[in-house]
Image (cartoon, coloured by chain):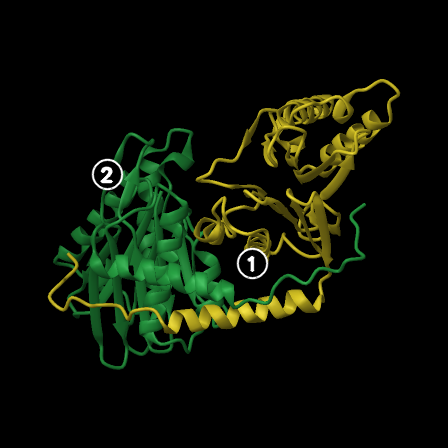
Chain colours: A green, B yellow
Amino acid sequence: MTYCVAIALDDGLVFCSDSRTNAGVDQISTYSKMFQLTNRQQQRFVVLSAGNLATTQAVIAKVKKDLQEAQATGLNQVTTLHEAAEYLGELNRNEQQKHNQGNASTFEASFILGGQLPDEKPQIMMIYPQGNYITTSSDTPYLQIGESKYGKPILDRILHPETSLDTAALCALVSMDSTMRSNLTVGPPIELMTYQSSKDEWRYNRFEKDDEYLRDLKRAWDARIAEAFQKLPAVSWKAEQTNK
Amino acid sequence: MTYCVAIALDDGLVFCSDSRTNAGVDQISTYSKMFQLTNRQQQRFVVLSAGNLATTQAVIAKVKKDLQEAQATGLNQVTTLHEAAEYLGELNRNEQQKHNQGNASTFEASFILGGQLPDEKPQIMMIYPQGNYITTSSDTPYLQIGESKYGKPILDRILHPETSLDTAALCALVSMDSTMRSNLTVGPPIELMTYQSSKDEWRYNRFEKDDEYLRDLKRAWDARIAEAFQKLPAVSWKAEQTNK
């Protein structure tokens, strides 16, 4: 499996992905699932991928090939992020159809695409295996692909469009930590990228398995959660109640 | 869906369940999923249920009927919790087979069974739709049925066999709160039961939707999580790193 999360904030974007790929428990490899793509207009796109590795690799390879074409095509000719998502969705669908001989779901892949194009705000889109896509809302400022349930509660609690880029990046890492702790098929290295819209500034970090900061974060969160627990109001028992 | 969790501790047992049942989003009802059953030897069993409502109701009805039989059968004749789980597993399998005409998974149900029988420590068992069952270990002192992923990380962080009964009960409620927040098909009333082995003491609480304690707990946890976040070490960016 995989876990990727992206967050769209008033201030910019956050992307976070794990790097574990598995086909059965005895075939586990490490592949990055975060791709940075720059077109001729020096516009940057970030793509996160989940699902069938052959499909995701083929789609990314095709995106890169299209960027090299003399004629403006693919990410070189899109003017909105919606168009970019439409393009990625089409590649995704086409790639699956090539190999599909009845068992369609085997080749399925999902993507998250993010970036900021002229006259648009920073946006993220989630592209389904069928090629259609959705974006965020102010109530749900994040998108997830892969093993998304374990890491969802912390996102629901912390994230709002007004959340700062740094807090959201931290929240993505904590969400990733919760997922890794509860699911073996999600694992390091962890990649983290942020985009601050006002400064047009991109930051990237790769945390290896033994990364000191990631270990500190995990330990600190464990300790803070334990502390937080101790401060919760004790269960109030109503002595008279009985269960049927 | 459903969310039920049970915890086996050195000190005793904790059970927690939601009460929402749905067959599609416009057919939502409230049914308790926590059943307390006492046999002729005054031994108490707690059963939590998830899955097809017709199956779970039929199984519980049969367990109760067997308890009334003149001849010692069912929970009246078991001497270990393993035997009780075996019995419940058989009822579960039989009930599904009655209605199964090809699409077996439609009628599937799962149960958690807990209690303490003479010369045994307090134990919990999870009974699969197939009728087989598992218990806990010191590394994994809890069992879940239903929509289990959202509420798992907090259990993994807090629970050990040495955890106190009160802390574990609180942890179950927080796990339930995380699940309700992220999944619409899990909802109140919330039922909570604990069993303290040394005192042979059972406690039960039912929290309605507007329960004051549950609301306080939710608010306190939100605030503590937000505080905990603010105390985490800020993301350490390694300026020289770049993503391919």
Which one is in front in this view, the residue at disc 2 or the one at disc 1?
A: 1
Q: Are marks 2 and 1 in contact (CB under 8 Å)?
A: no
Q: Residue at x 50, y 52 (%)?
A: B150
Of residues A111 and B232, the one drawn nearer to the viewer in this rendering: B232
Q: Amino acid at mark 1?
A: Val
Pinpoint the chain carrying mark 1. Answer: B
* Secondary-structure class at tag 1: helix
Q: Judge left or right: residue A84 versus residue B183.
A: left
Q: Amino acid at mark 2?
A: Ser
Q: Residue at x 31, y 50 (%)?
A: A49
Of residues B194 and A179, the one drawn nearer to the viewer in this rendering: B194
Q: Position of residue B52 (x, y in %)?
A: 69, 37
Q: Position of residue A191 (x, y in %)?
A: 25, 57
Residue found at the very far bottom of the displayed protein: A198
Q: Which mark is residue A29?
A: 2
Q: Position of residue B217 (x, y in %)?
A: 60, 66
Q: Which residue is mark 1?
A: B174
Of residues B94 and A66, the one drawn nearer to the viewer in this rendering: B94
- Image quadrant for the C terminus of chain B? bottom left
Instruction: Give the crowd class for mark 2: few <14, some 14-19, many >=20 residues within 10 Å.
Output: few
Q: How many marks?
A: 2
Pinpoint the chain carrying mark 2. Answer: A
Q: Judge left or right: residue B33 versus residue A88.
A: right
Q: Which mark is residue B203?
A: none
| Above or below, comparing residue B95 to residue B15 in the picture | above
Q: Position of residue A100 (x, y in %)?
A: 36, 33
- Can I make out residue A104 in this image? yes
- Can I make out residue B27 in this image? no
Residue found at the very far right of the displayed protein: B70
Instruction: Give the crowd class for mark 1: few <14, some 14-19, many >=20 residues within 10 Å.
Output: many
